[in-house]
Amino acid sequence: MLKINNLHARVEDKEILKGINLTVNAGEVHAIMGPNGSGKSTLASVIAGKEDFEVTEGEVILDKENLEDVSPEDRAHKGVFLSFQYPVEIPGVSVTNFMKTAINESRKAKGLEDMPAKDMLKLIREKSELLEIDRKFLSRSLNEGFSGGEKKRNEIFQMAMLEPKLAILDETDSGLDIDALRVVANGVNKLKTKDNAVIVITHYQRLLEYIVPDFIHVLHDGKIVKSGTKELALELEEKGYDWLKNEAVVK
Amino acid sequence: MDLKEKLVSSFLAFENNVDVDNPVHDIRTAAIKNFEAKGFPSKKEEAWKYTSLNSLQKIDFSIFPKMESNLEFKDVKKYFLNEIDTYKIVFVDGVYSSFLSETTHEGVDVCLMSSALNKPTYKAVIDVYFNKIACKDDSLTSLNTAFSKEGAYIYIPKNKIPKKPIEIIHFATGSEAAALLQPRNLIIAEENAELQIIERHQSLTTNEVLTNAVTEIYAAKNAIVDYYKIQNDAHSSSLIDNTYIDQKDASHVKVHTFSFGGKLTRNNLNFYQNGERIESTMKGVTIIEGKQLVDHHTLVHHIEPNCESHQDYKGIYDENATGVFNGKIIVEKLAQKTNAFQQNNNILVSDKASINTKPQLEIFADDVKCSHGCTIGQLDKDALFYLQSRGIPKKEARALLMYAFANNVLESVRIPELKTRINKIIANKLGVNLGFDL
Ligand SMILES: Nc1ncnc2c1ncn2[C@@H]1O[C@H](COP(=O)(O)OP(=O)(O)OP(=O)(O)O)[C@@H](O)[C@H]1O
Ligand SMILES: [Mg+2]
């Protein structure tokens, strides 16, 4: 589904991604771990099409299509979804209206009519129940004054509404209390099918007990320095990243 | 002959058509003298530093309205707030259109300035209020006063509330190559009275139109006046709006100004607080592009203690548009416990657009709360990416952010249908259909 080849990206003069290779197939769950500042969020943003980052080498391919000149909105229409590490506050736009616009714009791009209001309401009800979100919450301005955990839960609500093919969850677990983590992880698992894929970016093994990855990759200084199966997370939890950094240097 | 000379010499012809024995005419005569002495303001004056009237003065405006032009209601229906029932005072090329209007004398007077100026029944009111709060020194106000003859006259007696909002609409049809219109409005809300007014200037032509309007509003004790100015005129039209508001004890006057259209728009909005516990509210949303210019000059004169003023102006400027915001607040020595708040936030969408924003505070009392702030920024790139990443195209995402930016001003519009209408005007202007009203 997703194939990243030798991806280099920079912002201004600073090179952040220095040759990433990653293949994600339909039905798989991948986890990306790695120290602060290693480039995890940058990788996520580049996949989602953020223009601040300049791709200097390599490519991102989704379903055999090179995404190079594809706008962020078109990537979304093709099924890419990014749950932001820091969701942006948009005062004056309610969660509901935002979702209506997002869904109908995606439908428009596919040549479909607007979703009938009745169906929209039903969908909103269903997905907010899945994520145990109070309906009152949905009439509030998007992310404005939301607690850290509420923002993250709201990101997954949006994911549930949009049903992406490829979901990238950037530190969705940080800020969530234990109960919320369970609810959110459960939501993600319920949405998981053999046709879609998830990339979870996290610092903690705990999330991976709920959303079990098929593969784990460690990003360090803009490169994937180690890949493995879920046992790698336990090893990282125990030993930290230093041994990998050294390994990378030795290589 | 330049425009000033033309205006001054036209005054003689004007006199042939009005009752020169009416005491009002002495006021006109004094006003034309002041205009003759001062002329049009120039960029040398601090208050007109960013807004030039030079090119307008080169246009050969026709000064006197001709006969009433025929407008079909169906052709102009869209400019009315036809979703709800309203009183309507409508002018076509400066001439009252009885056909398009719906006035009343039932308990309240919603009618014409020409009647008020000429009929004996109104004389007592005219003597007390006409040209009393309007600045006699200001040259453009004087120009309007000199030719004052027609406009809206609204009188709401004590404890009365009109059954419905009042629309004042000025159409220009372009039957003249270039037309100068000078409506003169007088609005009086007596003690405990309450009213809502929507004012609109609408040119139906690509010919030049210059409107130099003066509106005097008197709000007596406890009166509530809610005034909405919809400035969405054609790009060949310019507007100089001079509004003067006199407030007495515990009255509340709110003026919302929505500036989207027009070539040059200058709003001179002046509040005088002649009483205690008064509230004055000024809010505005400006969204312009091309070579449009919108200049807001506000004045709040805090004269007595325990009063408040709130100003919240938002501006979004694209392409080569120019914005000006100058908010003057005077707090007299007597006006202790004044609470004056002023906020002006701006977004420059293009790097060729500009905004000149300046608070001007003159505070002579020591126990006051005065806050002011202005910001100039761009659309938030991270917010834009966030919206796009959810499948909302860039154009719509930008529009959504602009809406969001202006939202708290839109929120305070108290007539829901008007709010919807303004939303639609904005959506149209930005060329988007977001599928909902904020
Ligand atoms: N817009 C930007 N301008 C300058 N530097 C940037 C920008 N965005 C990211 N960086 C830098 O790139 C590096 C990688 O940042 P990134 O956010 O991808 O790290 P991360 O792996 O997600 O870290 P964390 O675990 O703390 O979230 C950091 O050094 C960061 O400061
Ligand atoms: Mg990060």
Image: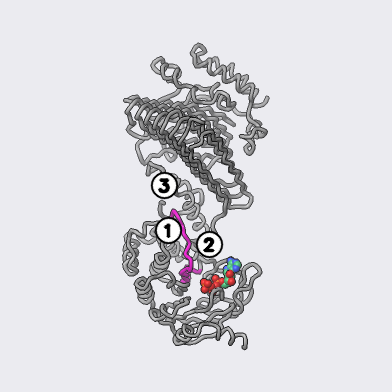
Q: Earlier in the sequence, mark 2 or mark 3?
A: 2
Residue B360 spot, x, y in % from top left? 57, 38
Residue A81 bears which disc, if any? none
Q: Neighbour class for label 1 at 10 Å: few (<14), some, many (≥20)?
A: few
| Distance from the alpha carbon under mark 2 to that under mark 3 | 25 Å
Mark 1: secondary structure: loop
Q: Secondary structure at mark 3?
A: helix
Relative image position of residue B362 (x, y in whole percent): 56, 35
Instruction: Check mark 3 vs ligand 1: CB closer than 8 Å? yes or no.
Output: no
Residue type at the position of mark 2: Asp
Within the image, what quadrant is residue A190 found in? bottom left
- Find disc 1 in the rendering and name its residue: A145
Task: Report the front residue among A17 and B63.
Answer: A17
Residue B411 numbered mark, or none: 3
- Under mark 1, the amino acid is Gly
Chain letter for the residue marked with disc 2 in the picture = B
Q: Which residue is mark 2?
A: B382
Give the spatial CA distance, label 1 vs label 2: 17 Å
Start-end of magenta stretch: A75-94
Q: Is residue B220 located in the magenta-colored stretch of the structure?
A: no
Is B152 positioned to the left or the right of A37 in the image? left
